[in-house]
Image (tube, rainbow, N blue to C red):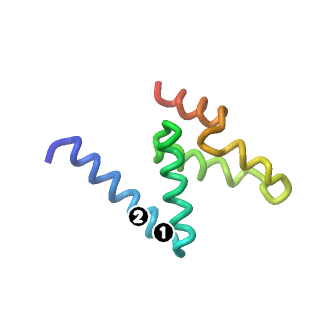
Amino acid sequence: MDTREATRNYRLNHWTEIVRECRSSGQTVAVYSMIESAKANGLNPYKYLCFIFRELPRVQFGQYPEFLEDYLPWSPDVQAVLNRAKT
């Protein structure tokens, strides 16, 4: 097994574990949707999910649901933070 194949297998196993942690099909669909949205917007899905899981607990969505827009993968702020991490 070469390095590229080992990396791909690791990532696949990692995503499988994330999806297993989701207890309902609705949660699974949400995770897949986040992954595909990140890909469609040119982001690394793993880094996007790490960013979301790190940042969202600090946001008061109950009081300010409009804040969610700032964390979607097409948000200029998200693009700037995650694309800056590429360099």
Q: Residue furthest front?
A: 40
Classify residue 35 as left or right of residue 12. right
Q: Residues within 10 Å of mark 1 (few under 14, many from 20)?
A: few
Q: Position of residue 7 (x, y in %)?
A: 28, 46
Indicate the secondary structure of the residue bearing disc 1. Answer: helix
Looking at the rendering, which quadrant does residue 65 occupy? bottom right
Please give the name of the residue rendered at 54% of the width and 75% of the height, measured from the top-left corner: 24
Residue 16 image position (x, y, % from top left):
38, 63
Q: Is residue 61 above or below residue 45?
A: below
Give the side of residue 66 with respect to residue 4, left or right: right
Q: Amino acid at mark 1?
A: Glu
Q: Position of residue 2 (x, y in %)?
A: 16, 43
Which label was assigned to residue 42? none
Question: For mark 2, what is the residue?
Answer: 17
Q: Nearer the viewer, residue 60 or 24?
A: 24
Q: Residue furthest right?
A: 63
Disc 2 crowd rating (10 Å Cα; few below 14, some 14-19, many 20+) is few
CB under 8 Å between discs 2 and 1: yes
Q: Nearer the viewer, residue 19 or 36?
A: 36
Residue to which mark 1 is pinned: 21
Q: Position of residue 13 (x, y in %)?
A: 33, 59
What whole-number distance in Å separates the C-alpha atoms at marks 2 and 1? 6 Å
Residue 54 to residue 78: above or below: below
Determine whether, in the image, residue 73 is placed left or right of residue 3: right
Which residue is pictured at 45% across the width and 62% down the height? Answer: 18
Judged from the image, the secondary structure of the residue bearing numbered disc 2 is helix
Residue type at numbered disc 2? Glu
